Amino acid sequence: MWGKRDDMVVHQVDPYNAEPPPRALAGEDTTAVDTFYSRNHGSVPEIDPDAWTLRVDGLVDRPATFGLDDLRRLFTEHTETATLQCAGNRRAGLIEVRDIPGEAPWGPAATATARWAGVRVADLLRHVGVHHDATDVAFTGADIATSPATGAPYGGSIPARKALMPEVLLAWSMNGEPLPAIHGAPVRVVAPGYIGARSVKWLERITVQEEPSDNFFQASTYRLLPPEVDPSSTGPGDGVALGLVAVNSDVLSPDDGAQVPAGPTTVTGYAFAGGDRTVVRVDVSTDDGQTWRQAELAAQLSPWAWRHWSATVEVPRGDVTVLARAWDSSAALQPERPEHVWNPKGYVNNSWARVHLHGV
Ligand code: MTE
Ligand code: MO
C-alpha cells in the first residue's frame, strides 16, 4: 500500500498510518522511501501538480501565489538531510504504563531520515517581504482531517525566526526521487528539529502572522498536558505546544525479545537530539543502569539528522535487559522511565531504550 514495504506495521488503513519494523531502520543513515513511516490525519488529497498553487499572505509586503514552475524559476534548489520524528514515536511504551484511549501504539520507528530537496522557505519569505512584527509562520495543507474529524485542512506553525533559517525547506524530492503522494506531493514543508507535525504535507498556503496557528493540530492537539488532565475536557491553548524535539534514542536490532547466542552480541540503534542540538554520546547498560559503557557513534551526517550507534554487549545464558540512553550537546539526558514522562495524549516518550534478550 502506498508503495511501502510489505512488512509495515499498519496502525490504520485510512488515513494511512504505518511504521516499519525497527530492524528495517538499523544501520541505514538515510531511510529508503518504501521504509519511511507515514503519519496522516486525513485521506491523501488528489493534487494535479500542474494546477497546484501556493498562496503566501499575511504580514508580508507583497502577497503572492506561486506555481511549481515559479518556485523552480525564482529560487535555488537546496538539499538537506534531516530526520523527521513524530511526537507519538514510542507511544507504546507509555501505553504500557497507563492506557491512552484513541491514540495508536506507535513503536520506535515513527522516525526516519531522508535527503530532502526543494527551495528554502527563507528565500520565499524574503521574496514577499516579511513584516518586522511577524512572530510565526503558519502552513496549511490540502487534506481535510478525518482523524480526528475537524472538517478543516491540516495545518500548524513554526516561529518566524525558525522559518527564516536555511534548513527549513519546501521539499519536492525525497532521496533523489520525486516526493511521493503519501509524503505530501507536490510540495511539503520540512522543518528540521521540530516535531514531524510541523512539516506540513500537500502545502497550499503559508501565512505570516503575529501568533501561532489556530489550526486544531497546533492549538488543540500535539500539546503536552499534565498527567491528571482528561484530554476530552481541554480546549485550544491548554497544555504546552510541542515544538522542538527532545533528545531520544531506541534500539533497532536485535528485536525486543530475541533469542541470541550467549556471548558477545552487537546491539544497534538510533539517537536523535532535536532542536539545533546534536547527539554527543550514547551509553548502554546490561546491569539495570548500575554501570554504563559508551556505544560507538556513526558520523554526524548533517546537523539535522539522527546518529546511529552500536555496542557489543556480553549476553549471559538466560534473560538480560539492554538499556540505552543518549546525551545531547546541551548535556540533556533522556529520562529513565516512561512513568516519568507519561502524559494523556502519549507524546514525547523519550525514556531510556530497553530491550529484553534471551541468551541461549
Ligand atoms: N501534513 C498534512 N497535511 N497532514 C497530516 O496529517 N501529519 C504530520 C506531518 N504533516 C500530517 C502532515 C505528522 S503528525 C507527521 S509526524 C509528519 O507529517 C509525518 O510525515 P510522513 O508521513 O511523511 O512520514
Ligand atoms: Mo506526528
Image (cartoon, rainbow, N blue to C red):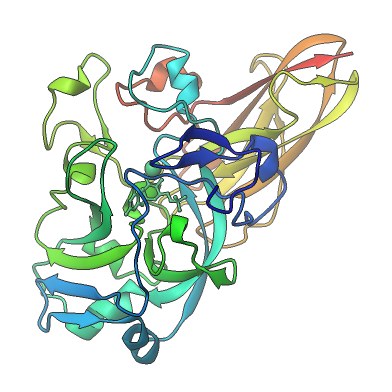
Q: Residue at x 32, y 72 (%)?
A: 121
Looking at the picture, does residue 286 appear above or below residue 154?
Answer: above
Q: Quadrant of residue 293?
A: top right
> Which residue is found at the position 39% from the left and 72% from the top?
166
Q: Position of residue 56 (x, y in %)?
A: 18, 74
Left or right for 352, reference 260: left
Q: Quadrant of the C terminus?
A: top right
User: Which residue is drawn at the image coordinates 66% and 15% (left, top)?
Assistant: 290
Quadrant in which residue 358 is drawn:
top right
Identify whether 315 is placed above or below 44. Answer: above
Percent x, y of residue 268: 72, 37
What x and y, as percent, mark residue 251? 65, 32
Q: Quadrant of residue 340?
A: top left
Q: Residue at x 44, y 75 (%)?
A: 118
Q: Nearer the viewer, residue 264 or 28?
A: 28
**Would residue 19 be found to the left or right of residue 209 on screen?**
right
